[in-house]
Image (cartoon, rainbow, N blue to C red):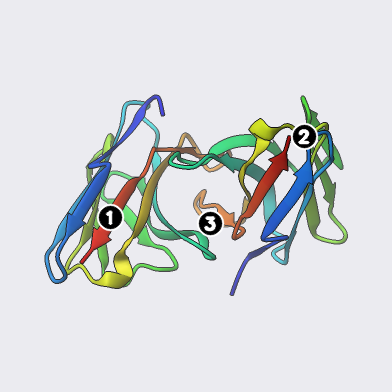
Amino acid sequence: DAGITQSPRHKVTETGTPVTLRCHQTENHRYMYWYRQDPGHGLRLIHYSYGVKDTDKGEVSDGYSVSRSKTEDFLLTLESATSSQTSVYFCAISESSNYGYTFGSGTRLTVV
Amino acid sequence: QQQVKQSPQSLIVQKGGIPIINCAYENTAFDYFPWYQQFPGKGPALLIAIRPDVSEKKEGRFTISFNKSAKQFSLHIMDSQPGDSATYFCAARGGSTLGRLYFGRGTQLTVWP
């Protein structure tokens, strides 16, 4: 989607290795979110940010950490990847708390 | 605890039919209710949204009906087309949630030609 880029698009990694996913936006939006999507579970919030260095946990934050040192970048780190973290990860941005999200195209992560 | 409950999980209709997807919520602080459409391999995209001061909103063939007293809202797709085949998510936001949306689990819609 225009204005928001996720990288990589696909990744295969081994159990126990750290993995970092990147979300980059050019919209200068304050709010950024990381979701995971799994069949039967829909979209579940991992972490979110409401400003530079301001982050908070979502409903499925165990095993994940985030950092936001610049407005445009929001990084999601799997500290020690497990097979249960195999999923499609989506980043989303929002201009304010009164508006909807714009989602990125997703990162498909496979942990073997 | 699921904040937004969505049904059905899957839906199959013939071209021209009117699929209806329903969502329910409990938190009366919610004040923004969007619907997202997702095609395979893509991220969800905002389709239509409503605020609780109106009972209905239409955009093209898509209509949201909102019942504040029942804490329910639904998506209707008029004259459905095969190109509408996608996964649909309802969501809700409000209160002190710092802008975060709570999503339903999604409905996979198939429209047969």
Q: Which mark is residue B97?
A: 3
Q: In which quarter of the image is the N terminus of chain A?
A: top left
Task: Point out the frontmost of discs 3 and 1.
Answer: 1
Seen at 47% across and 34% down, the residue is: A95
Residue A49 appears in the picture as rendered? no
Amino acid on which disc 2 is placed: Ser
Compared to residue B22, the image places residue B64 above or below, namely above
Residue B93 in the figure: left or right of residue B113: left
- Residue on which disc 1 sits: A109
Task: Point out the frontmost of discs 2 and 1.
Answer: 2
Q: How crowded is mark 2: few (under 14 residues within 10 Å), some or many (20 or more)?
A: many
Same chain for the residues under marks 2 and 3 in the image: yes
Query: SS class of the residue under badge 1?
Result: strand
Q: Residues within 10 Å of mark 3 (few under 14, many from 20)?
A: few
Q: Residues within 10 Å of mark 1 (few under 14, many from 20)?
A: many
Q: In which quarter of the image is the C terminus of chain A?
A: bottom left
Query: SS class of the residue under badge 3?
Result: loop
